[in-house]
Image (spheres, rainbow, N blue to C red):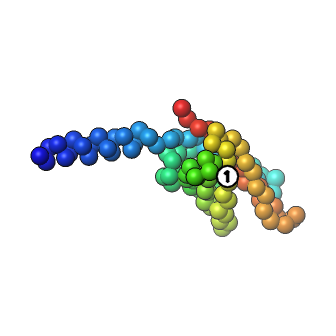
């Protein structure tokens, strides 16, 4: 009996793993005429992933929403600066950008999200 239960649990777990959508995400930060681009992140829906370059640490997560859009959450640390820009994209992915700050101190955040087959 316990062997049947183990087999059933493995089947359910493998089905859940296969059902997860994957994405490629690249983030770009522009500040003071400097452009910082993250290495490409491989994301599995609903899971946070992190990558770094010399200047910043990028953490991102993608979740599918009930209205069939994709919600992209980001946490970006660049030196002493910390930002949490979020974007809503169409289900096929795409690009989005956001600018925050004042004219002398503008930060521009952009993401590019590619849905994997």
Q: Is residue 98 visible?
A: yes
Which residue ends up furthest to the right in the rendered image?
103
User: In the displayed structure, does residue 4 sit left or right of residue 80?
Assistant: left
Q: Is residue 12 left or right of residue 64?
A: left
Residue 74, x across and y down, in percent: 61, 57
Give the side of residue 76 with respect to residue 42, left or right: right
Q: Residue 28: in sight, yes or no?
A: no
Quarter of the picture containing the C terminus is top right
Q: Nearer the viewer, residue 97 or 90?
A: 90
Task: Describe the element under mark 1 as helix, strand or loop.
Answer: strand
Q: Is residue 55 above or below residue 24?
A: below
> Could you tell me residue 79's position as x and y percent?
65, 63
Residue at the location (84% across, 66% down)?
102
Does residue 71 lie above or below 26 as drawn? below
Residue 83 x, y percent position in the rendering? 66, 63
Q: Position of residue 58 (x, y in %)?
A: 59, 54
Q: Residue at x 46, y 43 (%)?
A: 20
> Which one is in front, 14 or 73?
14
Quadrant location of residue 107?
Answer: bottom right
Numbered disc total: 1
Q: Which residue is mark 1?
A: 88
- Give the residue at x 65% y 65%: 82
């Amino acid at each position: 009996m316990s062997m049947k239960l183990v087999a059933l649990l493995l089947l359910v777990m493998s089905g859940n793993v296969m059902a997860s959508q994957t994405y490629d995400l690249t983030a770009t930060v522009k500040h003071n005429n400097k452009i910082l681009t993250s290495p490409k992140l491989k994301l599995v829906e609903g899971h946070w992933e992190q990558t770094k370059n010399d200047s910043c640490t990028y953490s991102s997560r993608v979740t599918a929403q009930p209205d069939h859009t994709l919600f992209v959450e980001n946490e970006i640390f660049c030196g002493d600066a910390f930002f949490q820009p979020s974007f809503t994209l169409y289900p096929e992915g795409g690009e989005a950008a956001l600018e925050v700050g004042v004219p002398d101190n503008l930060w521009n955040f952009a993401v590019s999200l590619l849905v994997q087959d």
